[in-house]
Structure formats: C-alpha cells, structure tokens
Image (cartoon, grey):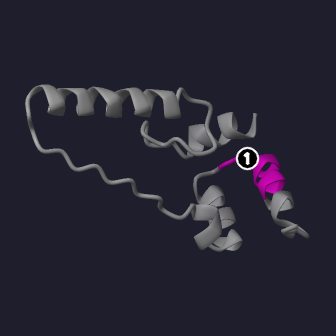
C-alpha cells in the first residue's frame, strides 16, 4: 500500500527493480540470455558489466527523504508512516 501511494508522488524509472513488485530478475536474465545467444550466433564480441549501486535509503539522510516527500505534497499520514519506519531501528548480525 505504501509503495502504491509513494509511487504516485515519486514515480520510479521503469527499469527500477528494488523494492517493487515486478517480473525483475527473470525478465533481466531472459534479456541477457538473448543477447548472449545473438552474440554467439553472429560471432560478435560481448562484454557484460553488472553494477550494484547503493540504495538511496543507505546513503541519503532520513530527514532529506522526509523533506522531499513533503515537497512532493505526499499526504502527512504517509510521511508519518515513513518517518516511523526510521525510529529506533537497528541491525543485528548473528
């Protein structure tokens, strides 16, 4: 529900795969498989690069995200839900 509400105010690039319901991996793998098949068939050189870019939630301050939601006029209830997700969070590694 939260993703649906936020996506109206903050549209994502159609290539975005993280934290959204999408065909995702299988679609990407099928595309890669097709490109490899084509390169082999045509005897073309092929280079493949996988880039893992840090997520925004790891690198942008929580306050900045909340201000951006306010600027995009997201309803206060949704902003409060996002804000509450950041309160008293911790990570445990076992």
Which sits in the foreground, 1 or 9? 1
Which residue is pictured at 58% across the width and 45% down the height? 18
- Give the quadrant of the N terminus: top right
In the image, residue 41 sits, relative to residue 57, either above or below, namely above
Principal secondary structure, stretch drawn in magenta = helix
Which residue is pictured at 66% across the width and 58% down the height? 70
Residue range corresponding to the magenta coloring = 74-82
The number of callouts visible is 1
Which residue is pictured at 58% across the width and 53% down the height? 72
Residue 41 falls left or right of residue 5? left
Residue 42 falls left or right of residue 55? left
In the image, residue 80 sits, relative to residue 6, either above or below, namely below
| Residue 36 image-quadrant placement | top left
- Give the quadrant of the C terminus: bottom right
In the image, residue 46 sits, relative to residue 24, either above or below, namely below
The spot of residue 78 in percent (x, y) is 77, 47
| Residue 86 image-quadrant placement | bottom right
Instruction: State yes or no: residue 59 in magenta.
Output: no
Residue 19 falls left or right of residue 78? left
Residue 64 falls left or right of residue 91? left
Instruction: State yes or no: residue 80 in magenta.
Output: yes
Which residue is pictured at 16% across the width and 33% down the height? 39
Q: How many residues crowd around disc 1 within 10 Å: few (fewer than 14), some, or many (20 or more)?
A: few
**Where is mark 1, residue-wise?**
75
The spot of residue 33 in percent (x, y) is 33, 29
Residue extending farthest to the right is: 88
The spot of residue 40 in percent (x, y) is 17, 31
The spot of residue 46 in percent (x, y) is 18, 45
- Give the SS element for disc 1: loop
């Amino acid at each position: 529900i939260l993703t649906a509400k936020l996506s109206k105010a903050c549209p994502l690039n159609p290539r975005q795969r993280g934290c959204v319901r999408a065909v995702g991996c299988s679609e990407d793998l099928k595309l890669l498989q097709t490109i490899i098949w084509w390169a082999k068939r045509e005897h073309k050189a092929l280079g493949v690069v996988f880039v893992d870019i840090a997520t925004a939630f790891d690198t942008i301050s929580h306050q900045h995200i909340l201000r951006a939601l306010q600027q995009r006029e997201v309803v206060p209830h949704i902003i409060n839900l996002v804000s509450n997700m950041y309160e008293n969070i911790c990570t445990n590694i076992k």
